[in-house]
Image (cartoon, rainbow, N blue to C red):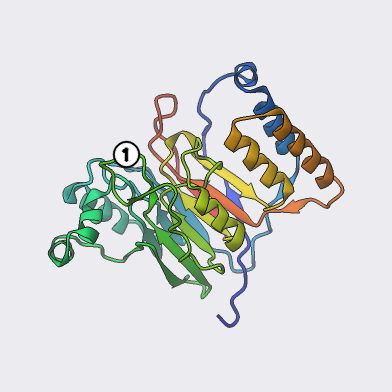
Amino acid sequence: MPGHESPTTIHIPPKGPQEAKGPSAWERFRGGPCLFLARKISDRRPITLRAPPEDPITVVCISNTYNERPQIPPGDILIHAGDMAEDGSLRDLQATLNWLKDQPHHIKIVVAGRRDKYLNKMKTGGPHWRHGFRRKGNWGDIIYLEHQQVVVAAENGRLLRVFGSPCSPKSIHSRAFQYPRDENVWNKVPNNVDILITHTPPFTHLDSLEGCWHLLRKLWKSHPRLHVFGCVREHHGTELLCYDDLQSAMEQIEAARGGFLNLLKVIKAFVRSLSSPDMEANTELVNACIVGGESDPHREPITVVI
């Protein structure tokens, strides 16, 4: 695309306390000393966000709202990463769509999630389902992506490539848009995408090890500026990726849930990183789940400027 430059990004933290009350540091250490130490070491490596461009775009990220209606901050783009309806019914889905349509954002993009079963039936149930939802459903100005790409133009004229997918590894038989965990469905994601929206997280990142390994491998190839997802409600927040040896070592020890040899790899990669200048993040991950667990039932949307 002529004149298209890779976006830069800065993260705007949501207002108010966002961290859930969890185990103490001592409890986390006892539960996995090698993994605990690896995380502490990795966190000491400084990673910087790129300065915002002259023509910034504000992206507001939400997911897993079910039937909740959080207050949405202003922005240029509003993204919903799936699980729009509690029971997956047309009624609840349309109620969420009506709420999203009422938001003032210039661009609104959604993907479905595991609970959005009506949309999965529309895909697999034949033409009568698609015709029925077109007749009954009202999307308004919302862009719905089902494993496909779109190029959007912000009000300031900037163009962004966005790929969105509802797919997630199979975990619960009755849920929607699931695929076998050993199947790679991510080859269709372009390597030059700016914003990636998936319902599932990448493996070992904000995911309780429930994310997709193939999606993680795709991130290593495509380096999207922003990756928005939901699905795993325990890990609302953000993370920065640099795609270097330290990140690779951390992914290994996270996947193995520890291990002394894996800890040594993390230490070695960290020491090597000290000889390099401060790393600049290639990708910002956003787990945008709004509805959480018992300790933090409600979260705020996450805003990113790219």
Residue 127: where, in percent of width, then height? 16, 67
Residue 271, position in %: x, y? 83, 41
Q: Residue furthest front?
A: 182
| Number of on-image labels | 1
Quadrant occupied by the C terminus: bottom right
Tell me if residue 206 comes above or below residue 51 in the rendering: above
Q: Residue at x 56, y 69 (%)?
A: 192
The residue under the point 57% across, 54% down is 217
Q: Amino acid at mark 1?
A: Ile
What residue did someone put label 1 on? 172
Is the N terminus in the top left, top right, bottom left or bottom right quadrant?
A: bottom right
Q: Is residue 305 visible?
A: no
User: What secondary structure is found at the residue carrying circle 1?
Assistant: loop
Q: Residue furthest right?
A: 275
Residue 57 pos. (x, y %): 53, 63
Residue 42 appears left or right of 3: right
Image quadrant in which you'd find residue 135: bottom left
Label 1 crowd bin: few (<14), some (14–19), many (20+), radius 10 Å? few
Decide if residue 135 is on the left or right side of residue 187: left
Can you give x and y, in whole percent of width and height, for residue 186 in the image? 46, 59
Q: In the current view of this chain or complex, which residue is farthest to the bottom?
A: 2
State whether residue 194 appears in this view: yes
| Horizontal relation, residue 183 to residue 88: left or right | right
Name which residue lies at 64% across and 68% down.
54
